[in-house]
Image: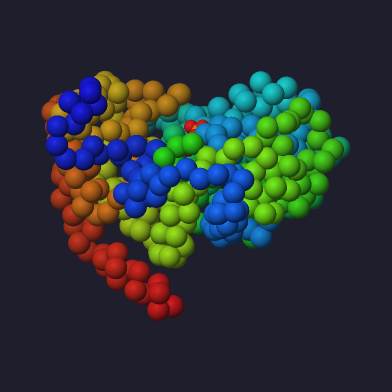
Amino acid sequence: MILLDKHPSGRHFLQIPGPSPVPDRILRAISLPTIDHRGPEFGALGLKVIAGLQQVFRTRHPVCIYPASGTGAWEAALVNVMSPGDKVLMFETGHFATLWNKMALRLGLDPEFLALPGYDEATGLPNSWRHGVQADQIEQRLREDSDHRIKAVCVVHNETSTGVTSDIAAVRRAIDAAGHPALLMVDTISGLASADYRHDEWGVDVTISGSQKGLMMPPGISFNALSPKAIEASKSARLPKAFWAWDEIIEMNRTGYWPYTPNTNLLYGLSEALDMLLGQGLPAVFARHQRWATGVRAAVNAWGLPIQCADPNVYSPVLTGVITPPGVDADALRRLIHDRFDLSLGAGLGKLKGRMFRIGHLGDCNDLTLMGALSGVEMGLKLAGVPLAGSGVAAAMAQFAGEPSVPDVLKSHNNR
Ligand SMILES: *Cc1c(COP(=O)(O)O)cnc(C)c1O
């Protein structure tokens, strides 16, 4: 029982930006007995979770649920609407955009990877990994594509490797302004149910998401939300698809069933998560993530450390990336904090390896669990000999105490 030995008392602080801490209520729901996935009770569960997901994605159109990680849902999105050699326009915002781009290559597509050029002088890090999607660059590229060879524009809504949330409505406007017929595909694996997201209103054709971030669930299921245009495109698309194919899933989902064995117990958890999120109301859910993000940024600013996201207009409500000073290995710091304080922080990924760490503020959190996490980070920074401008913990306490409480925010939402 190595795990138990390492956690002699109290809760582990899982402060990574996904998997997020899972509320006990959801874990208990998952522990219920597995039922017959072809039996009469199951259809009601299937219909309920699909209807709830439609509310969270803000769509009236089908949402497919896969027993797979988010990466599976990325693949599902591409293989359903693309044909071999199709050109897709992707935008480099960080590690996840890069992985999706690699997947497009492996599937035999022809991805073009736009990026904000240049490097940040102070940190030497690429500008594109500190900012969001640049809709004007997308518009310009689409205008140049007069024979419409680009079949899809693929962007990441909340780039979990950097803590930057891009403006998806602006990308939609860019595609429309260029008069281009490309599909819009959006990864909001870490944005859904934490940051405002509107599949129909923003004219997204395929939205990809996963269970283990804002939905507060364990990893293991993921989603494709569709548009009528995407469903139409899937009928003539020629990349091979079988397990991922939308058509049979949509057909069986009409009565709440799947063409294969779905992840029954995770669907119990999803049902509970949807009750919690929709019961509280999405505006209140978004408000509490913004509140935590503001508190965490107050701490980072007080420490005098740079925030990975260099554009305050697109700070993520889900996580905050913290750049460590030159010579301070962020991975060694994370290791120290883990070993001393039983607190897990997100690593710098890809081009950011060792240069930064990420604090997740999503899932089963509240002001005090975040204060605990920030205390662990501050103690770790001091132990690692990082010079700090001031106390981030004191700044975050002042921030949280200066704002209305979460129940007050909820009350004002419910009275609206
Ligand atoms: C977590 C994440 C992924 C990958 O999802 P997996 O479940 O690990 O396959 C992809 N994109 C973003 C933005 C993510 O946050």
Determine the image quadrant of residue 235.
top right
Residue at image location 37% in from the left, 56% down from the top: 290
- Where does the image place residue 209, in percent across and percent down from the top left? 55, 43
Can the viewer see residue 71? yes
Quadrant of the drawing holding the N terminus: top left
Q: Is residue 376 left or right of residue 345?
A: left
Position above or below: 198 against 391: below
Position above or below: 20 against 87: below
Quadrant of the drawing holding the C terminus: bottom left
Which residue appears farthest toward the bottom when viewing the image? 415
Q: Is residue 173 left or right of residue 162?
A: right
- Where does the image place residue 299, in percent across and percent down from the top left? 24, 46
Towards the viewer: 386 or 242:
242
Residue at image location 55% in from the left, 27% down from the top: 99
Residue at image location 66% in from the left, 21% down from the top: 106
Q: Is residue 86 left or right of residue 38?
A: right
- Where does the image place residue 367, in percent across and percent down from the top left? 24, 54
Q: Is residue 230 left or right of residue 134?
A: right
Residue at image location 57% in from the left, 40% down from the top: 262
Position above or below: 412 against 83: below
- Where does the image place residue 167, in percent across and percent down from the top left? 56, 50
Towards the viewer: 118 or 365:
365
